[in-house]
Image: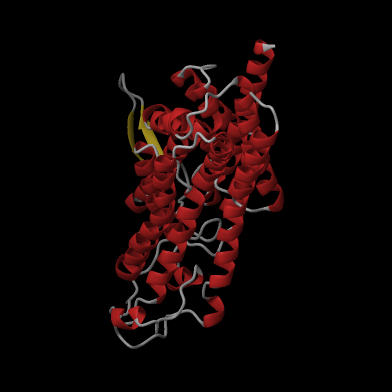
Amino acid sequence: MVELLFALGVLVAIFVGFNIGGSSTGVAFGPAVGSNTLSKLSAAALMTIFAMAGGLLVGPAVVKSLGSDLVATQFSPLISIVVLFFIGVALFLSNVVGVPASTSMTAVGAIAGLGLARGTLNAALMLEIVSWWLVSPIIAFWVSGVIGRYFYPRLVEWFAVSQSEGSLLDFDRSGAVPRPSLGENTTPREFVGTVVVIGIGCYMGFSAGASNVANAVAPLVGNGSLDLYPAILLGGGAIGLGAFTIARRTMDTVGNDLTDLPLVAAIVVAAVASTIVTFLSALGIPASFVIIATMSIVGLGWGRATRTTRLSDTVQGEAPVASVGALTTDAEAADAPTVGGKKGTPKQAETEPIGEESRDDIPSASDLFEPGTTARVIFLQNIVPSIATLAAYLVFKFLPIA
């Protein structure tokens, strides 16, 4: 019986990691695949490697928080299976309805439901986690807002992935060690842009592994069924399985359907969100990449839309509402590449000085981000973890699961 429960627990953990890999790979490497910088196969391989690295190097702190610190209840094999089941089903339902749910928040919710039902929840740690959940999106908003207001137009001017004919690199194999050099038609701008796009994808994969591997295996570590590092390898392998299979569709969606989001904006959002998530993972805090990235997009759009408005006016509420549409203005004017869209070398463009009254380059109100839409998405993102928390609480409170 024990062996059967262990096998079932491993299968459920693989199912959770499989779903994580399917969704996270699209977010991490969608821009690179959409701009034809990477193939889907290469993206899946890089996702597997860097998610595994993030789990091994930073993930143990999150595994410890979820597996032993958040609740004092001993994770029996059956309890572990039930908790992982709630995580997996909640994420599956979110994928069915098309709502990008937070894996970390769902995992914390299911484990917190167990702690509330048994009276063993670590309230201090839970308060710390929730506090970071509230603070981290605000940090993402303001960091991205500053970039959008003061640096974004210049980033658009010099950044591009302008694909030339032929290979990116040529290799001189006359010696014992092949020596790389730029391809015949490759420009330094193209090479740097390509490296940045791939590097950001790898960084996001590392961040996803640091935060999300724990969500798949923490209960199994908590009950002693698996040791820490074999469990992380199992979770990382399951993420890789998802990356090579169901992630192909999500990479298509992110890489080819989000044509309104300029590539440089996608890179800024990825860098900001991944840095915050990796930092919190190192502290042992399970973080929501989805919500942090959403607020980063809003902040970047706000900074761009308010660029030609005095800062005092924005504080007084006289600035236009920000949006993703605000990010496309410079991209269209400069012929900058978009995710899954056109590619080319941007032209030099004059940008309005910050604080000038001219607002000719500000998007119209119809293009601006609708706060109601954002509120609805964030609301739905929080509903999924809430469902997992309530379901776990009711099951562990009223059913004799030991």
The image shows residue 109, relative to residue 305, as above or below, that is: above
The image shows residue 356, relative to residue 306, as above or below, that is: below
| Image quadrant assignment for residue 182 | top left
Q: Seen in the image, is 395 located left or right of residue 26?
A: right
| Image quadrant assignment for residue 83 | top right
The image shows residue 399, relative to residue 315, as above or below, that is: above
Q: Residue furthest bottom?
A: 357
Q: Residue at x 57, y 43 (%)?
A: 106
Of 393 and 140, which appears nearest the observer? Answer: 393
Quick one: quadrant of the C terminus? top right
Q: Position of residue 351 (x, y in %)?
A: 33, 76
- Can residue 308 be seen in the rendering of this structure? no
Quick one: quadrant of the N terminus? top right
Q: Residue at x 49, y 58 (%)?
A: 294
The image shows residue 365, relative to residue 158, as above or below, that is: below
Q: Seen in the image, is 264 located left or right of residue 258?
A: left
Of 390 and 159, which appears nearest the observer? Answer: 390
Colouring mode (rainbow / by chain / secondary structure / one colour): secondary structure
Q: Position of residue 115 (x, y in %)?
A: 54, 36
Q: Residue at x 46, y 65 (%)?
A: 298
Of 320 and 316, which appears nearest the observer? Answer: 316
Q: Position of residue 256 (x, y in %)?
A: 60, 54
Of 216 and 326, which appears nearest the observer? Answer: 216
- Can residue 90 be seen in the rendering of this structure? yes
Q: Position of residue 280 (x, y in %)?
A: 37, 43
Q: Seen in the image, is 56 located left or right of residue 390?
A: left
Image mark count:
0
